[in-house]
Image (tube, rainbow, N blue to C red):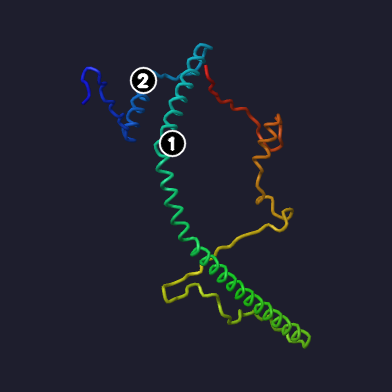
Amino acid sequence: MPNPKTSLPAVQPKKRLTPEETVALLATERDTFLQSVQVKEITTQEEYATIAEVWKRTKDLTNRIETTRKAVVGPFNLQIKAVNDLFHHAAAPLVTVTDACQQAMSKWSNVLAAKDAERQRLLNEESKRQFEEKQKAGIGTPLPVAVAPQVAETPRKIETASGTVSMIDNWKVTVTDEAAVPPEFRSVDLKKLQLAVDGCARAIAGCYVYNEPFPRGGRG
C-alpha cells in the first residue's frame, strides 16, 4: 500500500483535443491578432517596417494553422488511401476488360465508317463517269446528285441482355506535322518564356515583362 507522505500524485493523461477544439483555439488566437492589425498605405520607412512585421506574424500564424491541419488530417488521409487502394485493386481487372471492349467497339465503328466512305467514293466516281459519257454523246444532262448508298450504319444504341450500351462520339486529334498546324492552334510555351526572364531577359517580342516583388520571411 503506497505511503501517502511519500507517494507522488498520479499523472493525469493529457486530454487529446478534437479537431473542433483545436480550430477553436487557433481561431481565438487569430481573432486576437486581427484586432491589433491595421494595414494602410505606406508613406515612411517606419510604416514599411510595421507592415513587414504584420506580414511576418500573419504568415507564421497561417503556416501554424496549415501545419496543424496536416497533423490532424494526416491519419485520416492514410486510412482513406488504404481503403481507396483496396477498391481500386478490386476493380482493376474489370477496368482492363471494359477498356478492351471499348477499343474493339471503336475499331469496328471505324471499319463501318471506312466502308461507308469507300462506297460513297465509288458512287461519286460512277456518277461522274456517267455524266462524262453523256457529255461525249451530246446529251446535256446535269451532273446527277450522288445519293449516299444504303450501308450498315454504326448502331448508336445497342440492347444487350444486361441493359443498353450507347456509343458516344469522342473525336480526338494527333499532330502529324507541327509546321502545318494553323497559328491559332499553336500554344505559347510560358515555361520557356519564364526561364528566359529568370535568365535576365527584359525584352521579348509580343510580351510584357514586368517586376512584381513579393515578401519573403526569415528568422530574426
Vertically, is 117 above or below 210?
A: below
Can you say whether 81 is above or below 30 in the image?
below
Q: Is residue 97 left or right of residue 10?
A: right
Residue type (three-letter) at the residue carrying disc 2: Gln
Q: Residue at x 78, y 85 (%)?
A: 136
Cα distance, mark 1 to mark 2? Answer: 27 Å
Which amino acid is tagged 1? Lys
Q: Which residue is mark 2?
A: 35
The residue closer to the viewer here, 103 or 176, is: 103
State which quarter of the image contains the N terminus. top left
The secondary structure type at the circle numbered 2 is: helix
Q: Quadrant of residue 142?
A: bottom right
The residue shown at (74%, 83%) is 129
Towards the viewer: 130 or 218? 218
Where is residue 18 drawn, in percent x and y? 32, 35
Observer-nearest of 115 and 68: 68
Q: Residues within 10 Å of mark 2 (few under 14, many from 20)?
A: few
Rendering coords of residue 68 (x, y %) = 41, 32
For the view shown, which residue lies furthest in the bottom direction?
Answer: 137
Circle nearer the N terminus (1, 2): 2
Q: Is residue 83 left or right of residue 133?
A: left
Q: Position of residue 162 (x, y in %)?
A: 41, 73
**Residue hosting label 1:** 70
